[in-house]
Each structure stands twice: as C-alpha cells, then as structure tokens.
C-alpha cells in the first residue's frame, strides 16, 4: 500500500459532475503536476480550490479540487478529489493524466480496503458501505447507516470483551494457582457467565435475521407442478403480465423474476419451472434449477390445484418443502374443490383465485405475519446485515453450546478454555480482528472501482 491509487468515483456517463479520487502519499504532488491554480502542496487540509486541469499547455477542463491530508481522511492517507465536468471523454482524460503522472488505477473496492487495513474502519463498517451503495429500500438504508456509524461493531466488541475477561480470569487461575487474591474459577462459576454471553449472542442472531430481511429482502420461490397457476400468481403479485400464462403444461421452462415491496421490505419473487418427471432435456434442466432454488429460498409459495386430487408430484413437492418457511396456496378456488385438504399437514394454507384476484391480499398478509414485517420498523436497525456476519455469529453460538456441554460433563477447565477462546476468535472474524488475505480480497472485489 505504498503506492498512490486513482479511480473514477462517480458513474461514468453524461452528467453535470464527475469525481476522480486519488489516495496515497504522492496524491497531492501528482495532482499538483496537472493543476493550474494554487500550489496544492501548500494549501490547508480539507479545502477546495478552483482551477484547470492541464496537459502541458492544453486546458483539459475547468475543475474544483478538494485536498484532504492524512490522517483525517477515509483511507487515512492523503486524498485529492478532482471535481470535473461530467462526460466520458473529459473524465477519462483527467484520469489518464493522473495515472500518467504516477498514480495506479485502483482495484475494485481498494479505497475501502485501505481504510480497513489502515484501521479506519472494521469489516462490518466496510460491508455496510457497500450495502448502502446498493440499498433499494428505506429499511435497507437504515440498517447500512447503523453499520457505518459503528453501532453494530460496538455490540460485537462489547460481547468479545466479556469473553476476553472470562478468558483472562481462567488463564490467571491456570498459570498462577498460588495467588490467593484472585477469584478461583471453576466450571460452576464459568457456567452462569457462559449462559449470559450465550443469551446476548442469541438475541443478536435473532435480531440480525430480521435485519438481513430488511437489508436483502425476502427471496421468494413459487413452486408447484405444471399448470397449477404459478405464473398467474406471479403476475397478480407484480400487477403486470411478467410470465407467460397458457393452459399448456410446462410453459415455464426457466425462472421468471420480479420484485415488489411488502410493508417496506423487498420481496424478490422467482417463478420456477413446474416440478414433475421431466419429459425432455430442457425441462429437466428447469426442474433441477427449481429444486436448487428451494434450498436458497427464505420463503416458498407452494401452489396446488383446488380442482384436482393430490398427485404423486404434489406429495413430492410437499415433502421437499416441509422444513422451509412455506405458504401453501390452493389455487383455482373458483372451481369445484377436489383436492384432499385433510392430507396436507402444513399450517399456513390460503385459497386463491387469479381470475378475480381473490386471495392475493390474504397471501400478502400471511407473508407479513410469517416474517413479522409489521414489527420490523420498530427495531433500532443495529444488527448484523449479511450472511457472512450472521454465519460467524451462529458458529460462535454453537461453540458456546459446546462449552456449556463440556461444563456439564465436568471437563477440566483448561480444556474448556480452548473452546471459549475459539468463540472469542470467531467473534473477531465478524469485525475483522482476525482475517485471511483471501477473505479480504474476495470481500472488497465486490465493491465498485471508485469506492
């Protein structure tokens, strides 16, 4: 990180303003070489200066240049931002000159990566930056802001501190058993402390599952055998004719997607190919894709035909979805009821009719009920907000459960201490106290170039 990087930080295209960001120890000197105006090496930090970007004697653009000196910057390095006129040709020419005079084109997310590696932000704050950029709802924005402001990180740091204090007391007992003025730490004394930490972590995980919904939306899969009305339900939910609807079985061969908002939360809906014994290769691929999507879904809308008895395919689908959060939709309620409703063991069952939209409101209300969407807006939004963070929290919780079990089995305290330390290190991975280069490279590669 000894070199100076540069990139376009605004969307490249026609617009009023474009911003080229430069960061590194040579940032001010490099921009000063192509700037006609004040001597940027002598100006105060956090000031803006009018002038022109020049290439030898040619004026390239009229600009405003912001100078921010280390360490009070996003990356903690010297940063210069060139505010030029928007437009592809002008923006690219300014960037070209910056690189020609000594900067390197930044990699995706490299500015934020430097902020993390230089200790300016932790991993939760870094990921929240990306979440904020890609926010599609007001709730998503609020979750991201709480992450950026450090509230979520502090929750994890406080929890780690409690674990660390417990570890310190245990280690003193192990290393200095002769000391009389320290608390003698036994399994019986460890247990209530572990239970307290476990309870706090459980609460974080539960609230974060809700936060993930606010941040990412609800991935919703519509499944069922062919010709039960899956595509019609998608169209009615979206209030547009997104999917082709015919009486011919197997019309939907691939997934059809759409997005709506329910109670302020994005619902990402995917209509899948009908699940049955495939009759050709194309249909087989579609069915396999439908089955794989079921595993990834937050919500399954399982559609059955009110006008037909349950088939072998229906029973198979019901079995596949039994451990998922599922709403069973008995479609075509305007027709004679032939389905054996008593053979369906699911709790969440509603009837719909896509001819006159009967049941669509009940379906939305059931989704609100299942995910407690009417309660999410009352939360403070300070929660883990992606799968990586939540998965690590769950791993730490499982480790603490192992610790509790070991205590009950009266395992020696020095052995129990090993697992407690594992939990502490796992919590550290959430905020980036411990990490691998591969993880960091992978995370920041998902960012845009100028961030």
Image (tube, grey):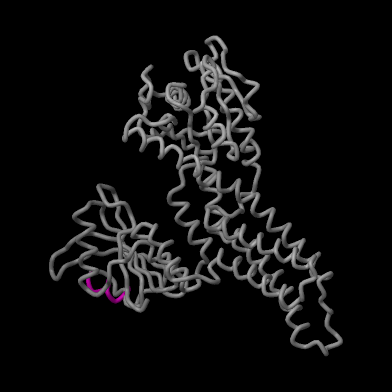
Q: Does 158 appear in magenta?
A: no
Q: Is residue 440 left or right of residue 372?
A: left
Quadrant of the image containing the C terminus: bottom left
Q: Could you tell me which residue is drawn at 43 percent across and 51 percent down? A: 133
Image location of residue 4, percent across then percent down: 32, 74
Q: Nearer the viewer, residue 371 or 331?
A: 331
Name the residue furthest bottom. 178
Instruction: Name the residue located 43 percent from the left edge and 75 percent from the top edge.
Output: 70
Name the residue located 18 percent from the left edge and 61 percent from the top edge: 60
Q: Range of the magenta residues?
A: 27-34
Relative to 73, does residue 288 appear above or below in the rendering? Answer: above
Query: Residue 127 at x, y = what percent?
Result: 48, 58
Q: In the rendering, at what x and y percent does residue 295 appear?
A: 50, 43
- The location of residue 380, given as percent across then percent down, is 64, 49
In terms of depth relative to the viewer, which is nearer, 415 or 261?
415
Residue drawn 47% across and 21% down?
Answer: 228
Secondary structure that dominates the magenta span: helix
Look at the image and tell me in which quarter the N terminus lies.
bottom left
């Amino acid at each position: 990180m000894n070199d100076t990087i540069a990139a376009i930080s605004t969307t490249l295209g026609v617009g009023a303003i474009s911003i080229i960001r430069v960061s590194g120890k040579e940032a001010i000197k490099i921009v000063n070489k192509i700037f006609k105006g004040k001597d940027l090496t002598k100006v105060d930090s956090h000031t803006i200066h009018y002038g022109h970007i020049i290439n030898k004697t040619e004026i390239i653009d009229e600009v405003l240049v912001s100078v921010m000196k280390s360490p009070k910057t996003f990356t903690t390095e010297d940063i210069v931002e060139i505010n030029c006129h928007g437009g592809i040709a002008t923006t690219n020419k300014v960037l070209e000159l910056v690189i020609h005079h000594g900067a390197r084109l930044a990699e995706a997310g490299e500015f934020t990566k430097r902020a993390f590696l230089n200790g300016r932000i932790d991993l939760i704050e870094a990921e929240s930056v990306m979440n904020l950029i890609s926010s599609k709802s007001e709730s998503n924005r609020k979750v991201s802001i709480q992450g950026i402001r450090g509230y979520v990180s502090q929750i994890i740091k406080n929890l780690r501190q409690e674990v660390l204090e417990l570890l310190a007391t245990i280690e003193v007992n192990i290393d200095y058993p002769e000391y009389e003025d320290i608390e003698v730490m036994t399994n019986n004394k460890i247990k209530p402390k572990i239970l307290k930490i476990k309870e706090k972590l459980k609460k974080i995980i539960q609230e974060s599952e809700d936060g993930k919904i606010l941040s990412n939306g609800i991935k919703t899969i519509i499944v069922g055998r062919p010709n039960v009305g899956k595509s019609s339900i998608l169209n009615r939910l979206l209030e547009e004719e997104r999917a082709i609807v015919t009486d011919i079985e197997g019309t939907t061969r691939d997934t059809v997607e759409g997005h709506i908002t329910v109670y302020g939360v994005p619902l990402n809906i995917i209509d899948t190919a009908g699940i049955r014994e495939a009759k050709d290769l194309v249909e087989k691929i579609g069915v396999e894709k439908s089955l794989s999507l079921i595993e990834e879904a937050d919500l399954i809308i399982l559609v059955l035909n009110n006008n037909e008895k349950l088939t072998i395919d229906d029973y198979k689908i019901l079995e596949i979805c039994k451990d998922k959060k599922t709403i069973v939709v008995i479609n075509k309620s305007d027709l004679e009821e032939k389905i054996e409703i008593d053979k369906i063991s699911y709790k969440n069952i509603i009837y719909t009719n896509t001819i006159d939209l009967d049941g669509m409101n009940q379906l939305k209300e059931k989704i609100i009920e299942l995910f407690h969407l009417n309660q999410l807006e009352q939360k403070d939004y300070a929660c883990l907000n992606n799968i990586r963070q939540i998965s690590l929290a769950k791993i730490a919780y499982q480790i603490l459960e192992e610790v509790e079990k070991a205590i009950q089995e009266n395992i020696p305290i020095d052995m129990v201490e090993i697992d407690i330390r594992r939990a502490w290190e796992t919590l550290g991975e959430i905020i980036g106290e411990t990490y691998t280069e591969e993880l960091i490279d992978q995370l920041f590669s998902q960012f845009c170039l100028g961030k």
